[in-house]
Image: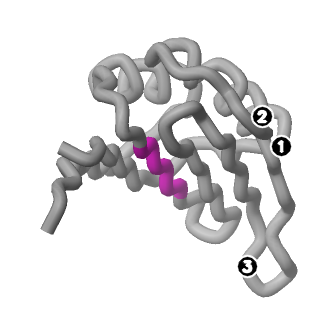
């Protein structure tokens, strides 16, 4: 296995802000045994696509969050070449962000 990729797409009950995303990106790597190498970096969306995007580079890959104001949609990716417990990630995120209509996918990345 090259890596594990967790993808979460959902609708938020309440929009998140820059501070919420920064807190998640600071806390989540440690919860899955990863070390932050750079970031987190958070940017505000443009007027045509308002919301927030944040990412953090971890020792084996990255975590990214895209939160959109329109429709309160959120997309979260956790990718790592080091195995991690996807249940820890999903439980943590469900406690931090009130979400419904959650779609969770786990992809094992392998060499072609």
> Magenta segment range?
74-79
Q: Is mark 3 on a helix, strand or loop?
A: loop
Q: Where is residue 93 in the image (x, y as percent from the top left)?
A: 48, 28
**Residue assigned mark 3:** 49
Q: How crowded is mark 2: few (under 14 residues within 10 Å), some or many (20 or more)?
A: some
| Position of residue 23 in the picture relative to residue 88 (left or right) | right
Q: What element carries label 1?
A: helix
Pointer 1 with pointer 2, Cβ within 8 A: yes
Image height check: is 24 above or below 2?
above
Residue at (68%, 27%) from the top-left corner? 36
Image quarter of residue 84: top left
Tag shown at residue 105: none
Q: Position of residue 64 (x, y in %)?
A: 58, 50
Pointer 3 with pointer 1, Cβ within 8 A: no
Q: In which quarter of the image is the C terminus?
A: bottom left
Residue at (28%, 42%) from the top-left corner? 4
Nearest the viewer among 84 and 67 is 84
| Position of residue 79 in the picture relative to residue 44 (left or right) | left
Image quarter of residue 89: top left
Q: Where is residue 43 in the image (x, y as percent from the top left)?
A: 84, 58
Residue at (49%, 56%) from the top-left corner? 75
Q: Given this view, does label 2 or label 3 mark the residue nearer the observer?
A: 2
């Amino acid at each position: 296995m090259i890596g594990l990729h967790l993808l979460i797409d959902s609708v938020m009950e309440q929009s998140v802000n820059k501070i919420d995303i920064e807190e998640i990106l600071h806390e989540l790597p440690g919860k899955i045994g990863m070390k932050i190498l750079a970031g987190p970096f958070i940017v505000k969306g443009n007027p045509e696509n308002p919301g927030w995007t944040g990412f953090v580079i971890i020792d084996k890959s990255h975590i990214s969050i895209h939160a959109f104001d329109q429709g309160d949609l959120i997309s979260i990716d956790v990718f790592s070449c080091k195995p991690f417990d996807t249940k820890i990630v999903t439980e943590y995120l469900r406690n931090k962000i009130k979400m419904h209509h959650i779609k969770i996918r786990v992809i094992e990345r392998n060499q072609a």
